[in-house]
Each structure stands twice: as C-alpha cells, then as structure tokens.
Image: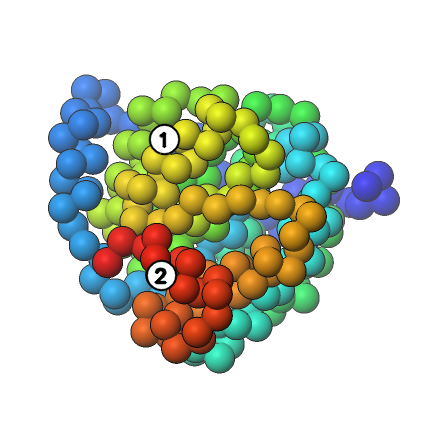
Amino acid sequence: MSRRNSSPAATGAAQIAPTRHPVGKDVAAFLRQAETIAPSGTARGRLVFALDATMSRQPTWDLACHLQAGLFEAAAKAGGLDVKLSYFRGRDEARASGWVRNPNRLEALMGRISCRGGLTQIDRILQHAAAEARRSPLAALVYVGDTMEEDIDRLCATAGELALRNTRAFMFLEGQDQTAEAAYREIARITGGVFLRFDPRAAARLRALLEAIGTYAAGGRTALEATGTREARELLADLRP
C-alpha cells in the first residue's frame, strides 16, 4: 500500500475536531430517554461510511473500498444517496470527506488512504456523525472495525445522541474481539441499528448487506421491504421499529 498518497490534501478529508462530553451528564438517564424515542422515518438519503484505518485493518482495506459501491448502486433505485467517508488512524488523526454521490469518487478517496498504527477513535466518529445529524437528517452510520480501546460509557452516551436524531448505526466487526463485539452490539442496540460481521471470506454477502443498508438509507423500511432479498429480511428482523 506504499504506492498510495495518503496526505490530507490528497484524500480531500478534513480533520475531525476532538470533542468532549458535558461534565456530569447522567448517562443512564440519557440513554433511557433515547430508547423511548422511535425513529420518525424522515431521515433519508444521507449516510456516513466510517472505517478504522489502523494497521490491523490493512489486509482488508481494499475489500472495503470495493464493497462500498454497493451502497450507491442499491440506493439509486430507492431515490439516491449522499455518502460521507470518515476514518481514523495513527496518533490523534480522524478525518471526514465532503458529501459524495458517486461510488467511483468515494473509492478513489479511499484508495489514497493508507493504514497507520494507532488506537481506536470511535467516539470521534460517532460525535462527527451526531454533528451531521444535527445539521440535517442522517439515516445511517455504517462503521467497520476490528477492535475497541475506549470507554464504553462514553461511546454509549454518543450513541444516545445518534438515537435522539433518528440515526441508526450498522456496526460491522471484523474478527472475534469480544470487547469490541460487546461495544458494537450496544451501539447498534441504542441507535436501533444492527450488529453485523465483516467476513472477508464472504465478500458477496458483505456487498449484499451494504446494498440493503444503502436501500434503507435512501428509501427507509418501505424500500427495504420491497427488495425481498435475504439480507434485507435479515436487517428488517433486527431493526427496531
């Protein structure tokens, strides 16, 4: 992957500013409130595609780059989709692109990014998605990672903010890290989203799942139900009404 130009200027991705949670927030009460608010069904057509770009993800980065096209292709049939790429890597680097409507452009952006060693910064990704949801309805966050090295309560508090904005998190886990799985499942549960496996050996299934998510983000449950695919039925079974 040394052939890639991974400078911020080359990727066109702006740094995501670090954010802090309010001191003294009653996390448990906040999450209870988030769970009582059902999605309104008004957030359509915008999705944040977020990835862990630390060194452990390097072997499957190219696969993720290729599979993302399914989001756009399926969403086009349900009204179209705007996608924002966000990622973290290295020491305190977390970036986000502008909104993209062309799968080739997004794949080109991802192709310029090389993975670098570092700890996870999932909270910054979630905070950025919450900020986007405050600006305009955001249907979904798709996150792909393989570990979690942060405070779970902080992640859950930010997930609660996404739930309040009717943004569902679709959390893909690569590998079998039990700590990460517990965190990913909880983030998905809080937001009414779905926990999923990112299995590089099942690329066709991964693409079908991303297509189903793209359909949901563009057209909601009605569009997802209309597809009738196995992956669509799987998501519908796990999505909170």
Vertical side of 146 occupied by 66: above or below: below
Determine whether the residue tagged by mark 1 lies in a helix, strand or loop. helix
For the residue marked with disc 1, what is the amino acid?
Leu
Q: Is residue 210 visible?
A: yes
- Colour convention: rainbow
Q: Quick one: 196 or 59, which is closer to the camera?
A: 196
Q: Residue 77 location in percent, x, y? A: 48, 79
Q: Is 184 displayed left or right of 157 in the figure?
A: right
Q: Residue 146 location in percent, x, y? A: 57, 33
Residue 109 image-quadrant placement: bottom right
For the residue marked with disc 2, what is the amino acid?
Leu
Q: Residue 141 location in percent, x, y? A: 43, 51
Q: Is residue 124 visible?
A: no
Find the residue positioned furthest to the right: 3
Determine the CA span between mark 1 and mark 2: 25 Å
Mark 1: give few (<14), some (14-19) or many (20+) Cα within 10 Å: many
Between circles 1 and 2, the one closer to the viewer is: 2
Residue 17 image-quadrant placement: top left
Q: Residue at x 57, y 72 (%)?
A: 73
Mark 2: give few (<14), some (14-19) or many (20+) Cα within 10 Å: some
Q: Residue at x 78, y 45 (%)?
A: 5
Q: Earlier in the sequence, mark 1 or mark 2?
A: 1
Q: Residue 112 location in percent, x, y? A: 73, 49
Q: Is 74 displayed left or right of 89 in the figure?
A: left
Badge 1 is on which residue?
155
Q: Quick one: 60 or 119, which is closer to the camera?
A: 60
Q: Residue at x 67, y 30 (%)?
A: 56
The answer to whether mark 1 and mark 2 are in CB contact below 8 A is: no
Badge 2 is on which residue?
236
